[in-house]
Amino acid sequence: MSTDDLSWRQLEDVDAAQLLAFELQHRAFFEARINARAPSYYRLEAVRASLDEARAQRLADQAYGFVLQLGGEIVGRINLTAVQRQHFNRAQLGYRIGEPWQGRGIASRAVAQLLQRARAELGLWRIEAVARAGNLGSVRVLERNGFTPYGRTAQSMCIQGEWHDQILFEWRSGEAPHLQPAPV
């Protein structure tokens, strides 16, 4: 399937069953690369609760979560979390793409689109991201989208009992820094 019909939208309650199926299908793949979710997450009630929390965080201008789809099928997620308006006007970027869709440019396209939205609609000036040093695909996605490394943490992330370094990245909108109130 072509990635030309990549779409994304805010996570909603109607996504619960499909989102749980996506997370279960790709659980082992994700857990080998990023921090594992608690086992209790993999129940429909828990996914629904996480969607309720996502909605509350969106309404409070604390986080914005989106589902990525190709042909109506969930292929990944992308989000901005830890939104800080006062003093910083920044957020933290995170994303996950299912294994069958790796290496097809989906993450790069989704990050580019989210950065446009962060600047134009959400008025965010700075976006930060963290990538495991050995996750070259994620490092490339960030660099392609104008993120630059600004630090490194040694042995700061444990995945399946092994400690990894992390690279800290930043992206700035290119405009002069300013503080902007939360969107209405």
Image: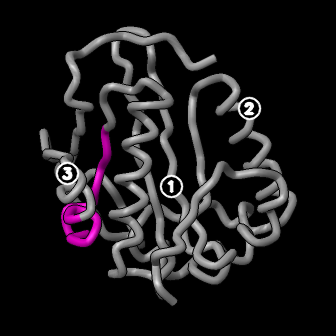
Type of residue at label 3? Ile
The type of colouring in the image is one colour
Q: Is residue 114 left or right of residue 137?
A: right
User: Quick check: 32 above or below 43?
Assistant: below
The image quadrant that residue 46 belongs to is bottom right
Q: Is 51 part of what is drawn in magenta?
A: no
Structural crowding at the residue carrying mark 3, measured as other residues with C-alpha within 10 Å and reported as few (<14), some (14–19) or many (≥20): some
Residue at the (35%, 53%) spot, across then down: 112
Type of residue at label 2? Ala
Pointer 3 residue: 167
The magenta span reads 128-140
Pointer 1 residue: 78
Q: Residue 43: x and y, percent?
A: 81, 67
Secondary structure type for disc 3? strand
Foreground disc of the pair 1, 3: 1
Foreground disc of the pair 3, 2: 2
